[in-house]
Structures are given as structure tokens and as C-alpha cells.
Image: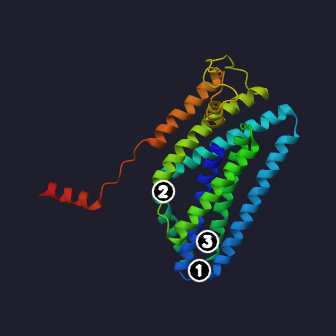
Amino acid sequence: MLPTFVIGLREGLEAALIVGIIATFLDRRDRRDLLRSLWIGVAIAVTICLAIGIALYVVSREIRQQQQERLETVVGILAVAMVTYMIIWMRRHAREMKGELEGAAAAALAKGSGRALVVMAFLAVMREGFETAVFLLATFQTSKSTGYGVAGAALGILLAAAVGYGIYRGGIRLNLARFFTVTGAVLVLVAAGLVVTAFHTAFEGGWITAGQRQAVDLTWLVRPGTPLESLLTGVLGVQPRPTVIEVVGWLVYAVPLLLFVCWPRRRPRPARAATSAATSSVH
């Protein structure tokens, strides 16, 4: 439930922030006539993403076992690729996201293309929604209870919508850089677990045969049926008897990306201080 909650919260908040920033911009520029189209576009995008997610889930359950394992491998790899790109992009642009969006919105309105903002919001929700559908499908494949997974995702999305609305109304202040750092670290661990699952399903599907020797016995820690096993396996992807290729895959993915996400960022040097330093050096 925790992985899907974080996914729903993280992806939902990204979409809510983009839509909220555009809606606020239109409101301030006295273009409320476009708000109705904005919300209709958002609703259509959400509906399409739900349909895609349900279709993928149904297809994955209707095919034969080996084909199902191969499809789960492809979905898992796609989900890992998406979340990796998302984490890296947000790490680099979280602080400037609002300014960049408002700049793009101002440029669109200056050209008389208010509809472009509606399309921008629609595409943002479509992108985040499709990423969420793929990532959740890959997570459901490792979950023992689809119901809990769906509940976690729904709670995360609802909370994201509430926070997004609060930011839009001006009642909530959120440190985006810190928020995306914390959730990014959690998602790195979730994605590392999906890497392990992808190696496992690739073996079951007949695509990978190397590295299948047992690396370590963790049954003393990951005991089936215990809450700790649900946490370690469901969130971190830790298996009771991981193979060599699974351990290597987890470490190669998780360690460098965790360092990238959690490493403190250098604050840009204030322009005034830099100018003063340059002036003093001249004198």
C-alpha cells in the first residue's frame, strides 16, 4: 500500500501543480473563460488514463503464463525508465518549475493562444496519468493484494488533489525541492524493487538464464507472512533468496540514484555577492 500511495501522491501532485499554476495564471490574467475548457480537458485526460490502465491490467491477466511473465518484464522496465527520468528531471527543475510554467503561459497568451494553455494542462495530466498507470501496474504485479494497492494509490491521488487545490487557493505553502527529494528517495527504492522483479520475470519468461545462483539467504529476515516481509519485499523488492543478478541489479540501480537524489545541492551564489567580490578584487 505504501509504494502505491507514494506513487499516487507524487505523480498526482505533479499534475495538480501544473494544472493549478495554469489555472491561477488564467485567473490573474482575467481569462476565466478558459477555465471551463481547462477542467474539461483535465477530466478527459484522467478518463483516458484510467481506461489505459484498466486495459493493460486486463490484457496482462488474459494471456498465457510465459507471455504474461514477458509482458510484466516489459512493463517493469518501462516503469523503471519512466520513474528514473521523472526523478532526474524533478531533481533538476523542482525549484524553477513554477517560473518556467508561468513563462510558457505568458508567452502563449502573448501570442493570443489561450487554448495552448488548455492543451498544456491536458498533456501534463495525460503524461503523469500514463506514467502512473504503468508504474502502478508494475507495482501491482509484485503486490499480494491488489485491493490495498488500489486503495493506496487512490489515497495518494486524493491527497495530491487536496494539496494542489490548497496551493491554488493560496492556503498551503510547500517546499517543492524538499518534497520531491523525499518522495524521490522512496521511489528509487520502489523502482529498485521493480528492477529485481523484472529480472525475475525475465527468467520466468525465458529471456535471461545467467546469474541465477542464489546470492544470499535472507529467510531469517524476510519471513513469509510477516509485516516485515510485506515491507521489505513490497517496498524495497528484497527477496528471501535473491539471485546474483537480482542483487547486482538492485545495487547498480539504487546506490547511484539514491546518491544523486539525496546529495545536497549547491545553492547558486547571489549575484550581488559575486559582483561585490569582483569589485573588491579590482580595487
* Comes first in the chain, label 1 or label 2: 1
Residue 17, visible in the rendered structure? no
Where in the figure is residue 33, as x and y percent of width and height? 64, 82
Question: What's the residue at 84%, 45% (across, down)?
Answer: 59
* Comes first in the chain, label 2 or label 3: 3
Hey, which residue is sitting farthest front in the picture? 226
Q: Say what secondary structure mark 3 lies in.
A: helix
Given the image, on which type of amino acid does mark 2 rest?
A: Leu
Given the image, on which type of amino acid does mark 1 rest?
A: Gly
Return the residue at label 2.
176
Question: What's the residue at 48%, 59% (across, down)?
Answer: 174
Disc 1 to disc 2, how far (Cα)?
A: 31 Å
Residue 131: mark in rendering: none
Return the residue at label 1.
112
Q: Quadrant of the C terminus?
A: bottom left
**177 on left or right of 282:** right
Given the image, on which type of amino acid does mark 3 rest?
A: Leu
Q: Say what secondary structure mark 2 lies in.
A: helix
Q: Quadrant of the N terminus?
A: top right
Of the two numbered discs 2 and 3 in the rendering, the one whose residue sits closer to the viewer: 2
Where in the figure is residue 85, as x and y percent of width and height? 58, 47
The quadrant holding residue 154 is bottom right
Q: Say what secondary structure mark 1 lies in.
A: loop
Return the residue at label 3.
117
- Mark 3 is surrounded, within 10 Å at the Cα level, by few (under 14), some (14 to 19) or many (20 or more) other residues, namely many
* Comes first in the chain, label 3 or label 1: 1
Question: What's the residue at 66%, 62% (across, down)?
Answer: 123
Of the two numbered discs 1 and 2 in the rendering, the one whose residue sits closer to the viewer: 2
Q: Nearer the viewer, residue 276 or 130?
A: 130
